[in-house]
Image (spheres, rainbow, N blue to C red):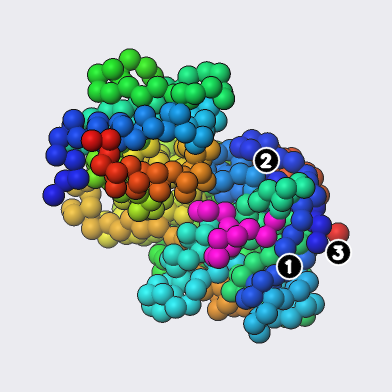
Amino acid sequence: MAVFADTDALYRTLGGFFQTLTTAEEGQLIHRVGGPVLFVYHRPEGRLLWSPLPPPGERPAFRVSYGDEAAGEIPLLTFEQDADTAHRFWLGEIDLAQALARQQLRAIGPLSRAMKLLPHLDTVYPRYAAWIAGGAGA
Amino acid sequence: MRVQASVLADYGRLELEELSLDDPGPGEVAVRLRAAGVCHSDYHVYSGDLPLPTPMVLGHEGAGVVAAVGPGVTSVRPGDPVVLSWLPSCGRCRFCLSGRPELCRVPATAAQHGTLPGGRTPFRRGAAGEPVYQFSLTGAFAEVTVVPESGVVRLPPGTDLEAAALLGCSVLTGTGAVWRTAAVQPGESVAVFGAGGIGLNVLQGAHLVSAYPRIAIDVSERRLAAASEFGATHVVRADQASALDRILELTGGEGVDAAFEAIGRPETIAQAFNATRAGGRAVVIGVAPPNAEVALNAFAFPSQEKTLTGCWYGQSSPARDIPALLRLHAEGSLRLRPLMSRRYGLGELGQAFEAMLAGSVNRALIVFDS
């Protein structure tokens, strides 16, 4: 059974989690990526966009846009995946290299920019687990 | 210990830095480098095409002398000459136990994180001891590095360490792709896309098993001249002629028995597949960015029964295969010295990259004061 029943559930859970990151210390890492990051989801369909909000150091560090709102900006990096894969990724259960190799995750754009985030994800994964355990904002 | 190292501070930015190096822990070995080859994989990390954490000590093809060993190390002792292996397999998993140590997940996972298998990196910088990551469990562009015990292969005393350095990646990979992955037989035809450090060793390996014809494809006149020296019977300038047309012409319209892609570009991977005969083998050795994708004709798979496969580290077992390569070198049939075109100091890695990209070297070598 899919983790997210519909797009609304996806936006509530993942979108809501991303909202919590906008004011978290880790949210500042978006400025090291250097541009908007788009997440495209399937089963259910959805789009979430992170848009950096300068200057670095200010909070929120980025804005989260949903669905059609996310179509207005050209992303620097795009990650396309099943919503279930995304859920497992933010729980820290996905090996990125393997996911790319199996095309469970498609990445478009300079992956090297994403490396600014990856070494810091170990502190983000427990936040997502806690977000889910806490009812994901429900 | 304080060591000089060429550090990738950020993508596209190298700095010669003095780092602190931890003593080898249990099951680890400190190696004082004598020589380290400069490979396209190092450049892929430098450019960000192969994104790994920074700051990082690059270099993964090296040879040197054991400086110290950690508790429990039994296979080498201080003073032993060794070559580094960037795939120190665990020896216990299903891949290791089934003779495919190059697929072991232990070094693969550690390499992704830029650390040793335990999750730590031996290099640090600054007063705060910021971790400096280590490329492929080696970090050979440092005066001394710390690696797992299974990441060194002991060499006979008196071994030419500059020549031996190349055994740790380009020679092992290129020859292994021919002998093990494609299992090329005498008289079979081969084509090699890319006549750099790996491609020259594909040709050398193909020559040693009497493959014919041996066709090299590249855009550099100098690299193609080197290809002829290392066993190519025919060369094709890909920017001046269709490689596929020439290969078909040389093989009676059939295509080659085995094609090797040693560049890491989706276009040349497709060309290698297309240049292979029905029932033939196409082997991808070149490392493409992890998000690159290849477009191929789907009908060709069932209708022509072609095999498209990959080759990681020559499908080798370094402890078994490096001594065998050394014996071939000693006997005179495997050429190592001519692979080395130019030597550079540790602070000249940027120039070595430029020479490699310009095609003006077979293999650039970083050499260390002994």
- Give the farthest residue toward the right: B369
Mark 1 surroundings within 10 Å by alpha-carbon count, few (fewer than 14), some (14 through 19), many (20 or more): some
- The answer to whether residue B96 is above or below residue B240 is below
- Give the farthest residue toward the top: A72
State left or right for residue B154 relative to residue B47.
right
Disc 2 is attached to a residue of which chain? Answer: B
Disc 3 is attached to a residue of which chain? Answer: B
Q: Earlier in the sequence, mark 3 or mark 2?
A: 2
* Quadrant in which residue A55 is drawn: top right
Residue B233 appears anywhere in the view? no
Q: Residue at x 57, y 54 (%)?
A: B114
- Seen from the viewer's position, the closer of residues B117 and B310 is B117
Disc 1 is attached to a residue of which chain? Answer: B
Residue type (three-letter) at the residue carrying disc 1 = Asp
Q: Which residue is drawn at 57% across and 49% down?
A: B41
In terms of secondary structure, where does tag 1 sit? loop
In the rendered image, which residue does mark 2 sit on? B9
State left or right for residue A94 relative to residue B225.
left
Image coords of residue B177 (percent x, y) = 47, 63
- Tell me which secondary structure the magenta stretch mostly adopts: loop
Q: Are marks 3 and 2 on the same chain?
A: yes
Q: Which mark is drawn over residue B23? A: 1
In the rendered image, which residue does mark 3 sit on? B370
Q: Which of marks 1 and 3 is nearer the N terminus?
A: 1
Image coords of residue B198 (percent x, y) = 56, 55
- Seen from the viewer's position, the closer of residues B80 and B7 is B7
Magenta-tinted stretch: B112-123
Q: Residue at x 42, y 53 (%)?
A: B284
Is residue B116 rendered magenta in the image? yes
Image coords of residue B60 (percent x, y) = 63, 58
Front label number (1 vs 2): 1
Residue type (three-letter) at the residue carrying disc 3 = Ser
